[in-house]
Amino acid sequence: MIVDDLIDSGKTMKYILDQYTFNPLETKIATIYCKSKATFKPDFFVEEIPAEERIVFPYER
Protein backbone atom coordinates (compact mmCIF):
# COMPACT_ATOMS: atom_id res chain seq x y z
CA MET A 1 0.00 0.00 0.00
CA ILE A 2 1.17 3.48 -0.87
CA VAL A 3 -0.25 6.38 1.15
CA ASP A 4 -0.06 10.07 0.21
CA ASP A 5 -1.75 13.26 1.32
CA LEU A 6 -2.91 14.52 -2.08
CA ILE A 7 -3.17 13.43 -5.69
CA ASP A 8 -3.21 16.57 -7.81
CA SER A 9 -2.71 15.61 -11.46
CA GLY A 10 -1.87 11.95 -10.83
CA LYS A 11 1.42 12.13 -12.76
CA THR A 12 3.65 11.62 -9.70
CA MET A 13 1.76 8.57 -8.47
CA LYS A 14 1.80 7.05 -11.96
CA TYR A 15 5.57 7.65 -12.09
CA ILE A 16 6.06 5.98 -8.70
CA LEU A 17 4.09 2.92 -9.78
CA ASP A 18 6.05 2.73 -13.04
CA GLN A 19 9.32 2.66 -11.05
CA TYR A 20 8.51 -0.54 -9.19
CA THR A 21 11.32 -3.00 -9.92
CA PHE A 22 9.34 -5.92 -8.55
CA ASN A 23 5.85 -7.02 -9.44
CA PRO A 24 3.64 -7.22 -6.38
CA LEU A 25 0.43 -9.15 -6.82
CA GLU A 26 -1.53 -6.13 -5.73
CA THR A 27 -0.81 -2.48 -4.95
CA LYS A 28 -3.36 -0.18 -3.37
CA ILE A 29 -3.15 3.61 -3.28
CA ALA A 30 -4.73 5.71 -0.51
CA THR A 31 -4.86 9.49 -0.17
CA ILE A 32 -6.66 12.04 1.92
CA TYR A 33 -7.52 14.32 -1.00
CA CYS A 34 -7.90 13.67 -4.70
CA LYS A 35 -8.45 16.50 -7.17
CA SER A 36 -11.28 16.08 -9.65
CA LYS A 37 -8.92 16.65 -12.61
CA ALA A 38 -6.56 13.82 -11.62
CA THR A 39 -5.88 11.40 -14.45
CA PHE A 40 -4.92 8.74 -11.90
CA LYS A 41 -7.50 7.96 -9.22
CA PRO A 42 -6.45 6.23 -5.97
CA ASP A 43 -8.18 3.12 -4.71
CA PHE A 44 -9.17 4.94 -1.52
CA PHE A 45 -9.54 8.63 -0.72
CA VAL A 46 -11.37 10.68 1.88
CA GLU A 47 -12.49 13.64 -0.21
CA GLU A 48 -12.50 14.67 -3.85
CA ILE A 49 -11.84 18.39 -4.23
CA PRO A 50 -12.29 20.80 -7.15
CA ALA A 51 -9.34 21.13 -9.51
CA GLU A 52 -8.80 24.80 -8.69
CA GLU A 53 -8.85 24.38 -4.90
CA ARG A 54 -5.51 24.83 -3.13
CA ILE A 55 -4.86 22.74 -0.04
CA VAL A 56 -2.38 24.19 2.47
CA PHE A 57 -1.24 21.58 4.96
CA PRO A 58 0.01 22.63 8.43
CA TYR A 59 3.58 21.60 7.57
CA GLU A 60 3.58 24.02 4.60
CA ARG A 61 2.96 27.12 6.72
Image: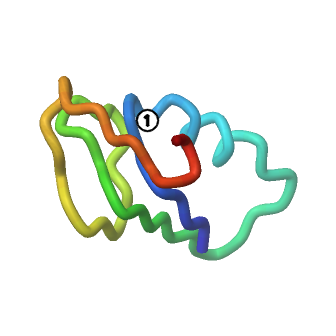
Residue positioned 33% across, 70% down in the render: 44
Figure check: 52 above or below 34: above
Q: Residues within 10 Å of mark 1 (few under 14, many from 20)?
A: some
Looking at numbered disc 1 in the image, what kind of residue is underneath it? Gly
Secondary structure at badge 1 equals: loop
Give 52 or 56, whichever is nearer the viewer: 56
Residue 50 falls in which quadrant of the image? top left
Q: Percent from the top left, x then y, of residue 29?
A: 48, 64
Relative to 52, 44 lies left or right: right
Figure check: 46 above or below 4: below
Residue positioned 37% across, 57% down in the render: 42
Give 27 or 47, whichever is nearer the viewer: 47
Outermost residue on the right side: it is 21
Q: How is the image coloured?
A: rainbow
Residue positioned 64% across, 35% down in the render: 15
Residue positioned 25% across, 40% down in the render: 35
Q: Percent from the top left, x then y, of residue 49?
A: 17, 45
Q: Percent from the top left, x then y, of residue 51?
A: 19, 28
Give 55 or 50, whichever is nearer the viewer: 55
Relative to 30, 45 lies left or right: left
Tally of numbered tags:
1
Q: Percent from the top left, x then y, of residue 37?
A: 22, 29
Relative to 54, 48 lies left or right: left
**Badge 1 is on which residue?**
10
Outermost residue on the top side: it is 52
Outermost residue on the left side: it is 50
Residue 47 falls in which quadrant of the image? bottom left
Quarter the N terminus occupies? bottom right
Relative to 18, 47 lies left or right: left
